[in-house]
Image: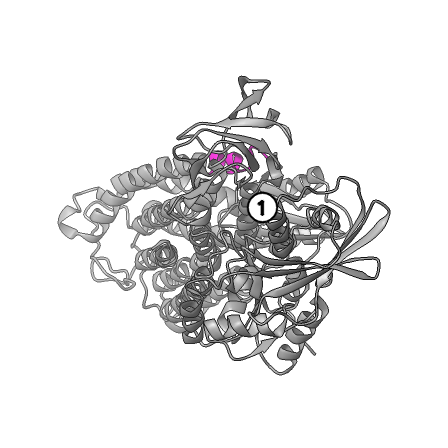
Amino acid sequence: MPSMKPDSKPLPVDEPVVLAVTGMTCAACAARIEKKLNRLDGVVATVNYATAKATVTGVEHRPDASQLVSVIEALGYGAVAPSVDVGESTVEIATEAHLVDIRRRLMVAIVGAVPVMAMSMISALQFDGWQWVALVLALPVSTWSALPFHRSAWRNARHRTTTMDTLVSLGVIAAMAWSLWALLFGNAGEIGMTMDMSFVPRTGSHHGMVVHDEIYLEVATTLVAFILAGRWFEVRSRRRAGDALRALSNLGAKTVTLWREGTETTIPIGALGVGETFVVRPGETVATDGVVVDGASAIDASMITGESVPVECRTGDVVTGGTLNTNGRLLVRATRIGRDTVLAQMARLVERAQDGKAPVQRLADKVSAVFVPVVIALSIATLVGWLVVSGDTQRSFEAAVAVLVIACPCALGLATPVALLVGTGRAAREGIIIKGAHVLEATRAVDTIVFDKTGTLTTGVMTLQKVDEIEPGHLPAVMAVESNSEHPIARAIVRGLVERGVEAASNVESFENSPGIGVSALVDGSTVAIGRAVGGDDSGATVVEARVGARVVARFHVSDEVKSDARVIVDRLRSLGTTPMIVSGDAEGAVRRVADAVGIDRTHSAVLPDDKLRIVHELQANGAIVAMVGDGVNDAAALVAADLGIAMGTGTDAAMEAGDLTIVDGDLAKVPRALAISRRTLRIIRTNLFWAFAYNVAALPLAVLGLMNPVIAGLSMALSSVFVVSNSLRLRR
């Protein structure tokens, strides 16, 4: 049986509903919302803490956004169903407001925590009554600065759930409650009381007697400060990680200069319609996808394709919205607008990839879901165990609080989504679209790469070398039929016939495209069918036959050039541990010519789309992990079936929709680059998860054994989150 991809090519009935979610404070929040949404009938939901978004896809019909918002709000969180135009700004506004709030609370926490910690740990600063001054400083920190943690814990408690904030809130409340008891009812409030600095839990002593006079105001204040600082850095870094997606979203023009009957009028981009002509002056961004109807210039597409060299364009050439016109004035007829543009599709694909989850994240999600309740139970057990063993209430309390603090699973929740956010963004800047998190796993294991020939290993710019006109007078009909096809060979035939002065017939009816076979249509009541002939010519060119009825009326000899860097790239892919091969619908001679040029031994020629699919399945059945690289309609089925489908963006929409990876500009050199970025992102994710797990595995026993001061526990927990985020940001380089 052929292998199947995880999350393999879902076919939603419509576009998913994307909600901006507010109020999430950790990955456990995201998991809770996701679980609740997935309980609704007929939907599949993914909630991403790093992007603060919920993506909900309907199984049979498009989900009701208002119902989804109500479900999320019932859990105590906020949700907004953004419009197409303001979705990203909604999230950005919420993120910026969240950052401002964290910064304010952090400033108050620092002002209070620094002197409290200094007085608690440095005997020389402990003047008479210092503990009461520390209490005054600690109260606003433990209440107002820590209010988000307390509010979140209360909200979760009302819904009988727990999150990381539950642990933080319990730790702060426990430390403050103990300190208040010791100050008000114990003897910690006595004038002249001192404490010594200790990185391990202290045992209380007063006038030579073991009493419970230690206070933990520094634990409460520094814990809040450390966690707020870590959270501020985390949110700020997450925003930086999404820079690539925002850059894509901001490339589009806001206004456009409409050209109508020789008059220029500036209108909002949303008012432009398909078929209308607009002006692009030097230095301006191309407003939307279109075809140049007048003028010549050089187009800088680096922000979309990653290619720094401008591309010359002239009348008849296709231009992409969001690219930069460098020198000439162009008149462009709009062919796609709004959500249909290449730029909009790229942004949606990147966003969906960032909102997805890699299979490696599933274990982390399962652990996070039960981690907090287990930690609370472990903290209680630690308290009871120490009381039974030692009878030292103070030591028992410290150990229990340390367990609560050090076990916060922040790093575990951030390990995957932040790395995925940065990695897919980095790929997008280079013109590589990674469509889903499952792609990362596939790239790691790929050992066989199947190439289509035309447009993949070759330039795809086919040239009509020779025309054998067997029955004169039929070329206008052939040209008319081929004008309706987007296949590179059809385009070459049309260009060649135009150069030869042929004018297309105008009355084409019942056009049909049979991938891998050819095209046909009725022209002046006669059936004209065009398809590849059996075999090629001596030069390896592809031979295409045109038939009227059952008669062959013309033969066309078409060929293209091998990409100049194809051999180097094939060798590079071999160095990544893959075996290349060619599977093409072209004749054996044409395929062998290309294979010899690029250094590939294994080939299949003259195959239909079904044959390509069968070959992929056979390779998988023999244990191979297959990547398919193609650009045509006839490659779509094989791209879907392959463990990794790599579509060349210069090909058809069908191929790009079917692929897992899209090379926007069709640059073959980006295939090994795409594999390298994907594999590196996966390595970063695995590193993050390892250290997140290792941190808790190593630290928890120390806390349970009473060897971890709660202050040090809070610092360690915050630093673990900072490490995970910082490690993920390495992908930006």
Q: Which residues are magenta?
A: 84-95
Q: Is residue 254 above or below residue 356?
A: above
Q: Looking at the picture, how far across and down is residue 577, in whole percent?
A: 45, 77
Q: Position of residue 229 (x, y in %)?
A: 34, 46
Give the quadrant of the N terminus. Answer: bottom right
Q: State whether residue 212 is above or below residue 249.
A: below
Q: Is residue 326 visible?
A: yes
Relative to 60, is 353 on the left or the right? left
Q: Which quadrant would the C terminus be assigned to in this image?
A: bottom left
For the residue marked with disc 1, what is the amino acid?
Glu
Q: Nearer the viewer, residue 140 or 294?
A: 294
Magenta span includes 88? yes
What residue is shown at x 45% (from left), y 49% (from top)? 305
Q: Position of residue 280 (x, y in %)?
A: 48, 29
Identify the residue at horizontal 53%, vertical 42% (top origin): 343
Position of residue 406 measured from the top left corner of the image (x, y, whole percent): 39, 60
The main secondary structure of the magenta stretch is helix
Instruction: Kindly identify which residue carries mark 1.
Output: 499
Q: Residue 154's image quarter?
A: top right
Residue drawn at 31 percent across, 61 percent down: 709
| Kind of element beneath mark 1 | helix
Q: In the image shown, does 169 or 139 lie closer to the viewer?
A: 169
Looking at the picture, tell me which residue is in the foreground, 140 or 667. Answer: 667
